[in-house]
């Protein structure tokens, strides 16, 4: 048993990162049995879940979307805010009932919550029916733990800085759009954020390994790739190879993948070289997610974000100027400890100035072990909720305004699915990452088609496929 340790997880040493190629485990042991997987949190977790699916499928499990039907339940958890944490424990209550009628059910917990001492302590004492708790750094061993699952609980979480594993397999959710990890972990240590503790030290994959994965995806017909990292701009800084994110982006663009995206960009490491590459290649999509977190330079300093409001604005304007028609979205936290009305007004002001194409907004949630959680906070929750409401109204106003710019325009949409809103329609994203519900046949799924936008809402667009009638 290896228990997590937040103090250890915070350390950054000179330990050399191992790049190791693993051989995925194969066994028919669970043939005919079913697994149920629930994923919480960010794209990194969604992509890890694609790895989990490949791991358990190679043990013989088939997927079910009905919890009661399953022989193996996996909760891939998120620790970024308290509400994600509460949802997982709520769900564990449901699983406890199921385990009473199905004693051989295997229950596994993966993801960021596994890395927290408070969580593993609670699981040890109050949730003994959980068989496996495995951390984010050793997910590739999940198959071994499932094969050996016993009545006694196995907790295997390491809090050292982590390594890089190649040869991972993925059962990808989409046949058209794929995630590709370019790096793991984060060294930024924003004072509110638990990620550097749960995901470990920043460690980049070698460029040749990433390109090999991308080339395989292109060869299998993928039309879109999103490069994934907590802070993609810092790619390569931890390697001694002499290349950076701009170099990687250029090489990936040259594979001729029709659409290339990347998330997430921290304003700190955004270089002109990167901007020039984005502007140069038409297959790099004109969309950037650039979290601001707050419009108050005082709060930004307390958050450890390493930029002021003015520096963010300067970068924002440069991006707008260099990349024509770019859409920029952001993340904003309200109610950071002792955020004053004036600080909050600074946030509203910057939203008015930048007129973001979209924003994810959150109430600050103290995370145990982070520096911000030690600050005594005098602002009542009701005030924070009121600020969030106000901010959301403003943010939604600008996302509607941004969407309205597309009215009656022709856009290119990569159709990936049947529309969730209306089963007679299909849906997909524009180059600028706008969701569109489209009147088009289902046979267009997996194609990039021309669409005329007929209606704009705050969170999506409606459109119809444009049909070209050739003049004879
Ligand atoms: N409380 C609220 N929001 C947070 N985020 C990260 N940590 C916290 C926290 N402790 C938000 C940030 C980040 C996004 C992924 O989640 O805005 O960009
Ligand atoms: Fe968290 Fe900051 Fe790293 Fe993003 S850059 S994962 S907010 S510490």
Image (cartoon, helix red, strand yellow):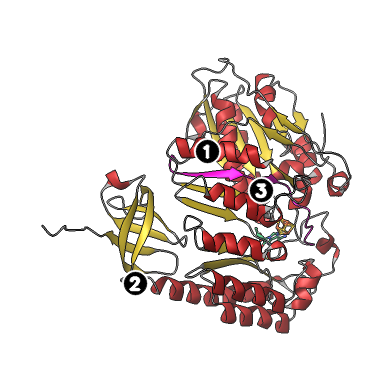
Quadrant containing the N terminus in the rendered view = top right
Towards the viewer: 472 or 445: 472
SS for callout 2:
loop
Q: Is residue 345 above or below residue 202?
A: below
Instruction: Kindly identify the residue that appears in the image at 59 percent across and 18 percent down.
Output: 26
Residue 215 circle label: 1
What residue did someone put label 3 on? 78
Q: Nearer the viewer, mark 3 or mark 2?
A: 2
Q: CA distance from mark 1 to mark 3?
A: 31 Å
Rendering coords of residue 110 (x, y %): 67, 38
Q: CA distance from mark 3 to mark 2?
A: 37 Å
Q: CA distance from mark 1 to mark 2?
A: 36 Å
What residue did someone put label 2 on? 407
Rendering coords of residue 77 (x, y %): 65, 44
**In this figure, what is the number of numbered marks?**
3
Rendering coords of residue 96 (x, y %): 63, 34
């Amino acid at each position: 048993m290896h228990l997590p340790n937040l103090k250890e997880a915070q350390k950054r040493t000179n330990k050399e990162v191992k790049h190791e190629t693993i051989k995925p485990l194969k066994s028919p042991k669970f043939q005919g049995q079913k697994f149920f997987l629930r994923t919480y949190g960010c794209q990194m977790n969604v992509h890890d879940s694609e790895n989990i699916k490949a791991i358990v499928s190679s043990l013989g499990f088939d997927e079910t979307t009905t919890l009661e039907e399953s022989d193996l339940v996996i909760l891939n958890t998120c620790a970024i805010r308290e509400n994600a944490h509460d949802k997982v424990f709520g769900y564990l209550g449901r699983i406890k009932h199921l385990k009473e009628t199905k004693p051989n059910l295997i229950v596994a917990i993966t993801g960021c919550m596994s890395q927290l001492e408070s969580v593993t302590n609670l699981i040890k004492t109050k949730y003994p029916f959980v068989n496996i708790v495995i951390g984010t750094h050793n997910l590739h061993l999940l198959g071994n733990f499932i094969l050996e699952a016993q009545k006694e609980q196995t907790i295997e979480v390491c809090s050292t800085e982590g390594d890089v594993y190649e040869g991972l397999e993925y059962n990808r959710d989409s046949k058209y759009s794929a995630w590709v990890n370019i790096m793991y972990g984060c060294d930024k240590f924003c004072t509110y954020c638990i990620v550097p503790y749960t995901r470990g030290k920043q460690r980049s994959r070698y460029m040749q390994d990433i390109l090999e994965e991308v080339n395989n995806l292109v060869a299998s017909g993928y039309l879109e790739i999103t490069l994934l990292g907590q802070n993609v701009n810092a790619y390569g800084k931890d390697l001694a190879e002499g290349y950076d994110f701009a170099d990687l982006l250029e090489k990936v663009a040259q594979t001729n993948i029709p659409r290339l995206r990347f998330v997430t960009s921290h304003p700190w490491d955004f270089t002109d070289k990167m901007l020039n590459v984005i502007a140069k290649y038409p297959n790099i999509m004109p969309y950037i997610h650039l979290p601001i977190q707050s419009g108050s330079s005082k709060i930004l300093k307390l958050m450890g974000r390493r930029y002021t409001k003015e520096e963010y604005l300067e970068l924002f304007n440069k991006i707008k100027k260099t990349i024509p028609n770019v859409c920029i979205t952001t993340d904003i936290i309200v109610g950071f400890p002792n955020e004053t009305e004036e600080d909050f007004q600074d946030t509203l002001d910057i939203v008015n100035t930048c007129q973001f194409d979209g924003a994810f907004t959150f109430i600050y949630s103290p995370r145990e072990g982070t520096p911000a959680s030690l600050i005594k906070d005098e602002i009542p929750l009701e005030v924070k909720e009121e600020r969030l409401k106000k901010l959301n109204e403003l943010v939604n106003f600008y996302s509607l305004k941004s969407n309205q710019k597309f009215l009656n325009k022709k856009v290119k949409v990569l159709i990936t699915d049947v529309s969730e809103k209306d089963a007679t329609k299909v849906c997909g994203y524009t180059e600028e990452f706008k969701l569109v519900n489209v009147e088009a046949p289902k046979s267009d799924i997996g194609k990039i088609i021309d669409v005329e936008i007929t209606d704009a809402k705050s969170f999506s667009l409606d459109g119809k496929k444009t049909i070209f009638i050739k003049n004879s």
